């Protein structure tokens, strides 16, 4: 297959986005199973229904994915029961007592309150004392070391693509990546109709900031060549395709694990937590991708996240890799929750709030065995939901009517709002005397605000889930304009969203702990953009001198790592020049040494890898021709930009 080319001539030599995760006939996913998953149903736990089409028309056509999941319970529809269901289906899907439904006139048993015992003190932790600026909070998640890895992999991938065309790849450095990230955030704040408009030259309508940071061509080059993994490891992994050893997430695995671990290091959740799913919009066709019918903007990859209800901080997450054998026994919703809720890492006494996709009696009972309490709405046709119709809510019951059934530790509640709402909980009482205001039509035909009863489970759920609605994606507008073709790039931008959101939340919590005024979200993002581009603007405005090299006392993790390497060759020049050579960066002096090509500097010259001018010097270690002069120090520049992590 011919390699694909983008507008910058970068080819996908290690496989296109479609090639990365091709679906073979043996790996194809059952259509009915995926349709149910897209509709928010679990094929293992949800009762078979012949009315799925009507469910789509009633629910998906008028609401997006986030609206469906996070709409107020008063406007939440109920999944239709199977038509023509007989006793055989009832027997299969029943798992609770045949007791009739109770009204609020009958008292419920008060369940014991959870004893909250977290493994660590909830809230921010292990933050450096000097951490105060948005950039410092952001670098907790995207450290300089991590960005150096991404720069190294991008340089290797870009060079490989350009070499096939016999063209030159211009190496990028960490400051270039910072500026690129700043521009992506900037595009989320200042929205233009096309990418080129940010670099538009016009007397009245041009934007001055983007051109100060980097050129349009350089931005596009980084965007197209952005790579997160070792290309040699990618090639070895591609050979394993079709076997159990093949890593579907190989191209993001390193960054994926680092971000997950760092999210847990600097924060511990408070008592109320939730599990939610996020869809990462993408263009590539891969088996990782899920979509919502008739919702083109929701086509993408699904992530399951565990977040703190009070702050919205994402503590853990994982990328859905497709149907597995594990999800076939208890259901994907069950397996997703169990994979994220680890009592050994979290502690006990947590209250978990989930939406209809996850709620099931089996899950809630197993969570209770871990001393994790749970609450959430439940489909009326889900396995284990009471099938007894005695004293259930009639269709014309007044607003605020409540019915409930308790099956040992499980409470099932029905409440009439705009529609019927079904809830399941392991720590609520059926009704605690709470009310909520609703507009009710009177006998005169006019609607007036009245207080109607509301179950404690519904009230608690609305209070906690309303606080964790994900804000608009910071990188969303850029992805709309750019449309990344590579699946791993799409997920990278979502990881970037997680890092920025968590950094903003930590800044808010730390300011509150110090009785200081926290930055607003907009002010935080604006300051972060300026801090990310500060070094680049200085570099563009100040001429580069031969003395501008890193100092030996640099706190850069890579320099620290290299400086502790024992057996490093000493720096020597085989032919002493008549001028004083520029000093080498500390990390380079241990691994790379310049050497003259011949004893006569006028013969044997080669083209410099960086500036393409003739030079008599090569790097003895890399066998690469590089200028090594006070006014043209390509030797240090090239090695600093092309740090490669194998």
Image (tube, rainbow, N blue to C red):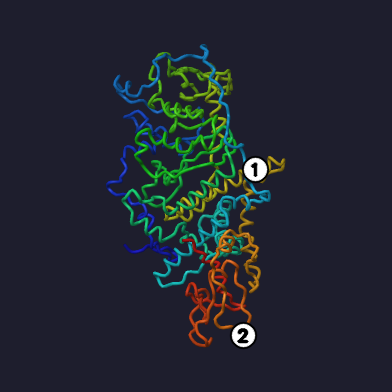
Residue 249: x and y in percent read 41, 50
Which circle, 2 or 1, is nearer the viewer?
2
In the image, what residue occupies the spot 39% across and 46% down? Answer: 289
Residue 302: x and y in percent read 43, 43
The one nearer the camera, 231 or 51, is 231
Q: Earlier in the sequence, mark 2 or mark 1?
A: 1
Residue 197: x and y in percent read 54, 59
Dividing the picture into quadrants, the one containing residue 564 is bottom right
Judging from the image, what secondary structure is the residue with disc 1 in?
helix
| Figure quadrant of the N terminus | bottom left
In the image, what residue occupies the spot 45% across and 65% down? Answer: 158
Q: Is residue 346 above or below residue 114?
A: below
How packed mark 1 is, by other alpha carbons closer than 10 Å (few <14, some 14-19, many 20 or more), is some
Tag shown at residue 578:
2
Q: Residue furthest left?
A: 25
Q: Residue furthest right?
A: 515
For the residues labelled 2 and 1, the Cα–Cα distance comes to 58 Å
In the image, what residue occupies the spot 40% across and 70% down? Answer: 165
Q: Residue furthest top?
A: 105
Judging from the image, what secondary structure is the residue with disc 2 in?
loop
Residue 605: x and y in percent read 49, 83
Tag shown at residue 508:
1
């Amino acid at each position: 297959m011919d390699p694909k080319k983008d507008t910058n001539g970068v080819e996908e030599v290690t496989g296109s986005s479609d090639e990365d995760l091709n679906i073979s006939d043996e790996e194809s996913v059952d259509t009915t199973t995926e349709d149910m998953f897209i509709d928010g149903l679990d094929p293992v736990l949800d009762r078979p229904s012949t009315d799925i089409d009507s469910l789509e028309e009633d629910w998906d056509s008028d609401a997006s994915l986030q609206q469906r999941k996070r709409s107020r319970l008063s406007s939440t529809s109920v999944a239709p029961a199977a038509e023509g269901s007989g006793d055989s289906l009832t027997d299969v899907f029943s798992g609770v007592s045949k007791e009739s439904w109770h009204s609020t006139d009958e008292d419920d048993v008060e369940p014991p309150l959870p004893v909250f015992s977290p493994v660590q003190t909830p809230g921010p932790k292990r933050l450096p004392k000097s951490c105060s600026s948005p950039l410092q909070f952001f670098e907790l998640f995207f450290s300089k070391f991590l960005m150096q890895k991404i720069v190294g992999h991008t340089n290797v991938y870009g060079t490989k693509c350009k070499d096939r065309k016999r063209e030159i790849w211009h190496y990028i450095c960490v400051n270039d990546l910072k500026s690129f990230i700043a521009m992506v955030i900037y595009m989320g704040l200042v929205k233009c109709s096309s990418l080129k408009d940010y670099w538009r030259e016009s007397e009245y309508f041009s934007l001055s900031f983007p051109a100060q940071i980097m050129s349009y061509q350089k931005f596009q080059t980084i965007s197209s060549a952005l790579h997160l993994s070792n290309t040699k490891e990618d090639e070895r992994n591609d050979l394993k395709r079709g076997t159990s050893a093949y890593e579907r997430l190989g191209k993001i695995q390193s960054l994926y694990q680092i971000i997950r671990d760092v999210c847990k290091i600097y924060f511990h959740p408070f008592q109320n937590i939730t599990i939610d799913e996020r869809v990462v919009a993408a263009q590539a066709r891969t088996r990782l991708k899920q979509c919502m019918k008739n919702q083109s903007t929701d086509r993408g990859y699904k992530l399951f996240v565990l977040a703190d209800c009070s702050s919205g901080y994402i503590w853990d997450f994982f990328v859905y890799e497709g149907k597995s054998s594990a999800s076939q026994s208890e259901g994907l919703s069950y397996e997703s929750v169990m994979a994220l809720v680890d009592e050994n890492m979290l502690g006990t006494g947590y209250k978990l709030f989930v939406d209809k996709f996850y709620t099931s009696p089996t899950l809630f009972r197993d969570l209770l065995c871990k001393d994790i309490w749970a609450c959430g709405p439940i489909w009326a046709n889900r396995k284990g939901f009471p099938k007894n119709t005695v004293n259930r809510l009639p269709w014309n019951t007044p607003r605020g009517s409540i019915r409930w059934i308790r099956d040992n530790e499980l409470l099932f509640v029905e409440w009439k709002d705009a529609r019927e709402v079904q809830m399941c909980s392991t720590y609520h009482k059926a009704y605690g005397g709470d009310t909520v205001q609703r507009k009710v039509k009177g006998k005169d035909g006019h609607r007036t605000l009245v207080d109607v009863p509301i179950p404690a489970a519904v009230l608690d759920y609305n209070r906690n889930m309303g606080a964790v609605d994900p804000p608009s994606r910071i990188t969303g507008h850029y992805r709309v304009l750019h449309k990344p073709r590579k699946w791993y790039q799409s997920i990278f931008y979502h990881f970037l969203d997680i890092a920025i959101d968590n950094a903003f939340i930590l800044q808010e919590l730390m300011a509150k702990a110090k009785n200081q005024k926290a930055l607003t979200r907009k002010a935080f993002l604006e300051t972060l953009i300026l801090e990310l581009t500060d070094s680049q603007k200085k570099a563009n405005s100040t001429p580069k001198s031969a003395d501008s090299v890193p100092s030996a006392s640099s706190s850069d993790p890579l320099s620290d790592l290299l400086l502790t390497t024992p057996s490093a060759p000493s720096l020597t020049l085989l032919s002493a020049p008549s001028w004083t050579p520029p000093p080498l960066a500390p990390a380079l002096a241990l691994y790379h040494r310049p050497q003259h090509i011949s004893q006569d500097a006028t013969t044997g010259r080669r083209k410099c890898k960086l500036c393409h001018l003739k030079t008599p010097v090569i790097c003895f270690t890399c066998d690469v021709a590089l200028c090594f002069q006070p006014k043209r120090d390509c030797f240090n520049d090239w090695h600093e930009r092309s740090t490669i992590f194998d």
